[in-house]
Amino acid sequence: MNTPRILTGAALAALLTIGAMPVRAGDEEPRESTGQEAEDTASAVMSQPLDGSSQEAFDASLARVETDATPDEYARLKNALGMMSAYDLAIRSNPSLLPQRVDGKTPSEVVQMAKDRWKL
């Protein structure tokens, strides 16, 4: 039987971190991404606020992000929400607080909030 793996520590940090930028012709090694480069290349949906006014509105917001964001951007958002669900004791004891906690924040802000809070 396959049991799901729970990501912690370095593995989880790696999923939430923006990796090296692709190598351009003439570059000898990959360049590290800067925060500004990541901001410039982020999908427009990553800067549109999430609607956490109800569970249905929140689900619709997540569906919009899943459709319009890159797979990497969506994975970072889902991982950030997973961190909040697992490690924020208020949300852990009452999952309906998650949409309220991120209401009005952009997906990029949610990812950064999780990075800052759990020092990833």
Image (spheres, grey):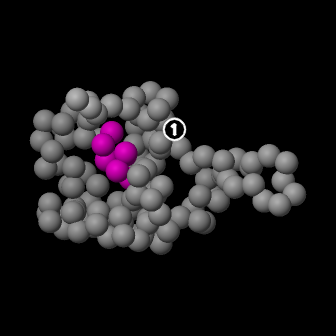
Q: Residues within 10 Å of mark 1 (few under 14, many from 20)?
A: some
Residue 78, magenta (yes or no): yes
Does the magenta run of residues contain 30? no
Q: Is residue 7 left or right of residue 60?
A: right
From the image, give the main secondary structure of the stretch colored magenta. helix
- Give the residue displayed 74% in from the left and 49% down from the top: 31
Q: Position of residue 67 (x, y in %)?
A: 36, 70
Does residue 85 lie above or below 105 as drawn?
above
Q: Horizontal and vertical percent for residue 114?
A: 40, 43
Seen in the image, is 33 located left or right of residue 50? right
Instruction: Identify which residue is drawn at 50% across, 68% down.
Output: 43
Q: Does residue 49 appear in this view? A: no
Identify the residue at image location x=40%, y=57%: 74
Q: Would residue 69 be seen by someone viewing this image from the given angle? A: yes
> What range of the chain is rendered magenta?
77-83
Q: Residue at x 85, y 48 (%)?
A: 28
